[in-house]
Image (cartoon, rainbow, N blue to C red):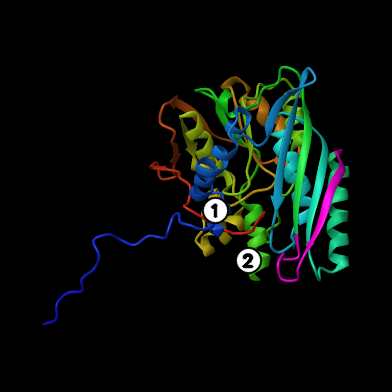
Amino acid sequence: MTSPPNFPDTCPVPIAEGDVVLLAHGGGGRLTRRLIDRMIVPAFDNELLRRLHDGAVAPFAGGHLAFTTDSFVVRPLEFPGGDIGTLAVNGTINDLACCGAVPLYLSCGLILEEGLPMSTLERILQSMRNAAAAAGVEIVTGDTKVVDRGKGDQIYINTAGIGQVPTGREIDPRQIREGDAILVSGDIGRHGMAVMAVREGLEFEGSITSDCAALHRVVGDLLDDGVEVHCLRDLTRGGLAAALVELAESGGFRFTIEEADVPVDEAVRGASEILGLDPLHVACEGRLVAFVPEPYAERALAVMKRHESSRMARRIGTVAAPGSGLVVLRTAMGTERILDLPLGELLPRIC
């Protein structure tokens, strides 16, 4: 009789951190958070950066300005519902909007790979122009660099944005309060699944189109209608789950989320099941989560539903007692589970 194999005492797990940057460090999960907390924030430490909001809101000339920047490396460049150009413009506008700012001006930094067809570049620039015009903002400055063939994956775009924050407006993770209603502006997971389907050549029973959209008019109407808004966060890498976990941990609150109330398109749900993904972790590019005092919840939903991009707005949960820093998901079966971030990347290069 042979001896039993000598297995190690511990179960091997993927290397979480090491001497090199991993693709997973850009995925919006735990590794992204560790990279930011342990390397980036300490390197540039200051009060504005420490807030880790969608942008920095800084005093300027007697008022306040919001400033944000983002880089886009999506593959493929074009997908149902948009392309890297519309993504860059709308994504930067949404960061400003979630700071409570009125978006004003954008920059455009292009890193082009030698061999990129001029026709592709022309389409992407036209998409950026159209998206900016539709949003009422201007692209006023930028930069262009070209890298060697094979070194740039066709095109990367960096955009920065400046917006004006009206006097007295403070929308910030630090404003979240116990008892706040948690709202999501629409169905989740569209963007990530749309990009994944094109990239991998997948065909699903229902068509899936990216939710890419500018949200500043939704936010503007909420505030103009008198809704008291404590915090906003747009849902990008890591999806709804990443936004909720980050906000719960940063404020030390317990969020209770009703899974049955989270809107998910049936085509996205079906595709997620086939691929073994949770829609809660799949990226959006035209959705936000809002924290408003309980008395304003119904009014906020009514305002959101005036807009096509947020017509499926729903209340999904409540901010419970502070102290735990956890997101608790109540399932349709009546059980509860802790909603957490994946360690690394589920869908790489989706924004």
Specify the label residue 61 is tagged with. Answer: none
Q: Between label 2 and label 1, give the one nearer the viewer.
A: 1
Reply yes or no: does residue 138 show up in magenta.
Answer: yes
Give, as a single range, the part of the protein colored magenta.
136-155
Residue 321 appearing in the image: yes
Tag 1: amino acid: His
Residue at disc 2, secondary structure: loop
- Pinpoint residue 109: horizontal percent, then vertical percent: 79, 51
- Residue appearing at x 56%, y 59% in the figure: 23
- Residue appearing at x 51%, y 23% in the figure: 179
Residue in front for this viewpoint, 194 or 235: 235
- Residue appearing at x 65%, y 53% in the figure: 190
- Pinpoint residue 80: horizontal percent, then vertical percent: 74, 60
Q: Earlier in the sequence, mark 2 or mark 1?
A: 1
- Pinpoint residue 74: horizontal percent, then vertical percent: 69, 58
Residue in front for this viewpoint, 85 or 284: 85
Provide the residue designation for mark 2.
204
Graded by Cα atoms within 10 Å as few (under 14), some (14 to 19) or many (20 or more), the crowding at tag 2 reads few
- The N terminus appears in which quarter of the rendering? bottom left
Q: CA distance from mark 2 to mark 1?
A: 29 Å
Quadrant in which residue 332 is drawn: top left
